[in-house]
Image (cartoon, helix red, strand yellow):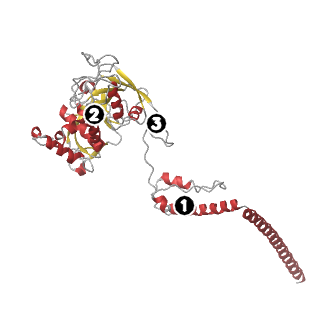
Amino acid sequence: MPHDSHDDDEEHLTEHTTHWEENTKMDDIDTMFSHLLEEIDGLSQSLAQSVVTDPELSTGRSDLNESLNSLDGNVGDVFAADPSTQPEERVHTESHTAPLGPPAAPPLPPSTSDHVTQTLDPEEENVPPAPKLTMLQTVNHEQPHNMIVKVLMADGSSKTLMVEGTQTVRDVLDKLFEKTYCDCGTDWSLCETNPELSIERILEDHEYMGESVSAWTNSTENKIYFLQRPRKHVMFIQPQFFYMWKKSCLKVVTEQDKQLLLKENFEGLSVVVPDLEGWLYLKDDGRKVWKPRYFVLRASGLYYVPKGKTRSSSDLACFIRFEQVNVYWTDSYRLKYRAPTDHCFVLKHPCLQKESHYVKFLCCEDGDSVLLWVNSIRIAKYGTTLYENYKSAVKRALNPPDLSSSGASTPSSANVHAPNQDQCTEAQEDEGPPDFIPPPPPGYMAII
């Protein structure tokens, strides 16, 4: 029993010593934390005084806090939005929330997306959107560069012109009228030829000349010709051919009927696209095989009827849209690509200069059909702008330039209203136009 009592005393003493040591350690820790908090408090007060004494730092701090609060709110909106947010938008937004260290300046607001809403001032909401820039315009509003363009004539001669970046095809035509003996008839055109694909396109009068030439690649052999093309304005001279082609009374249309058709289809709020549909041959990509398909023309593009479907609007499939493509005439495609006929046309982007699966080859049954399809596509693509070009050309033909001041003279047989010249001969300083006009050079595409 005494022995047990002694053991109990030692055990109590050990426990008492352990409790005393733990209490001592806790007191030391409390004291250390108290000193640390006092130091932090003093440091915070000193920093606050230095920030208050500098008004710029104070303003920057408040702006930073406001920007961070705004950013936190926007990020919350992103993560609370629909989970179907596109990966590009989500990655772009998360990049603003990544911990990249203390920012030196207020962060930029996150990019606007379908799931991120930003509050705009009333003045900012009324600001119109920035206009779309063409190839001739730059972000810095720099003036487009001038370029030297070589224009070929049908007789083999050429004219080298300095073309300003803002000059249209109409401006270049007027310049050529002043430098040549040809009249100012409405049929004169600038034509772009591509020997690689054996195609030709009539440049529209409203197009920028520099923009059209700038689309060519360095290795291309494209050329610009100054030629007469009666088909350029055929839709305004013979509108019944495009808007009454389904009827059998085309030969009894009076001039009054033609003017009525022009007024109904081109002088309204929007142009009326010819109701055109029919069978065309489509060339397979990379092969000289042509397959028939039923195509339908709409204002938005060219559509076709898939196999096994009807010709109803709900079954039509889009073949190509006209915003980024041009339509081209062709030459000798029966020999070049084994086409069913030589009456073909091509739809392609202006930058494509060689054959590819993005270049679409189509073939018609006869010459009237290809004339109808190509010009109807031009109407669908350019709308009322084509009619404005035609009226400007007629006005120019009725008021030809006075060539007496430049030392040139117009042939007496030239008819402004109905030009009969087949070629245009370059004006000479002391000589009149030659009596004999040589034929076109060999291999030239004589497309009427």
Report the residue that reaches farthest toward the bottom.
1
Q: Which mark is residue 75?
A: 1
Separation of marks 1 and 3 at Cα, in angstroms: 43 Å
Q: Which one is nearer the viewer's eye here, 261 or 332?
A: 261
Instruction: Point out the image quarter for the N terminus.
Output: bottom right
The nearer-to-camera label among 2 and 3 is 2
Please report whichever mark, 2 or 3, sits nearer to the chain's N-terminal start: 3
Label 2 element class: loop
Picture quadrant where residue 322 is located:
top left
Amino acid under label 1? Val
Residue beneath disc 2: 399
The nearer-to-camera label among 1 and 2 is 2
Q: Which mark is residue 218?
A: none
Please report whichever mark, 1 or 2, sits nearer to the chain's N-terminal start: 1
Amino acid under label 2? Asn
Q: Residues within 10 Å of mark 2 (few under 14, many from 20)?
A: few
Picture quadrant where residue 210 is located:
top left
Residue 323 can be seen in this image: yes
- Residues under numbered marks 1 and 2 in contact, where contact means CB atoms less than 8 Å apart: no
Q: Which one is nearer the viewer's eye here, 265 or 415?
A: 415
The nearer-to-camera label among 1 and 3 is 3
Residue 365 can be seen in this image: no
Residue beneath disc 3: 144
